[in-house]
Amino acid sequence: MLGFARLGGLLGAIAALVALLIILVKQLIALVGFVMFVLKIAIVIAFIGLLLLIAITFLSARRKRRREDEEL
């Protein structure tokens, strides 16, 4: 009878470890998903910033060219 109790305790411990591993993997997947989302948002913000920088440079060069044409 004592052997069955030990076997039950061992199987219970293994089942608890497996359950903890499953929970850990789920949390890890959620963390990776969140990090990927943040990375995507950062890439989009950087792209928008780059487009704004290009537009500002284009407009300032155009304005400078107009001033030079008016001075001549």
Image (tube, rainbow, N blue to C red):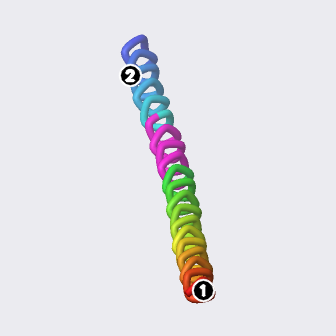
Q: Which residue is mark 1?
A: 66
Q: Nearer the viewer, mark 2 or mark 1?
A: 1
Residue 8 sits inside the magenta stretch: no
Q: How many marks?
A: 2
Which residue is farthest front?
72
Residue 26 sits inside the magenta stretch: yes
Type of secondary structure dominating the magenta stretch: helix
Please report the bounds of the magenta region as a residue range: 21-33
- At label 1, the amino acid type is Arg
Residue in front for this viewpoint, 1 or 40: 40
Which residue is rendered at x = 53% and y = 43% of the image? 27
Residue in front for this viewpoint, 30 or 6: 30
Residue in front for this viewpoint, 15 or 29: 29
Element type at mark 2: helix
Quarter-of-image position of residue 71: bottom right
Q: Position of residue 62 (x, y in %)?
A: 57, 83
Q: Work out which quarter of the rendered image holds the C terminus and state it.
A: bottom right
Q: Which residue is mark 2?
A: 7
- At label 2, the amino acid type is Leu
Q: How packed is label 2: few (under 14 Cα within 10 Å), some, or many (20 or more)? A: few
Q: Position of residue 42 (x, y in %)?
A: 54, 57
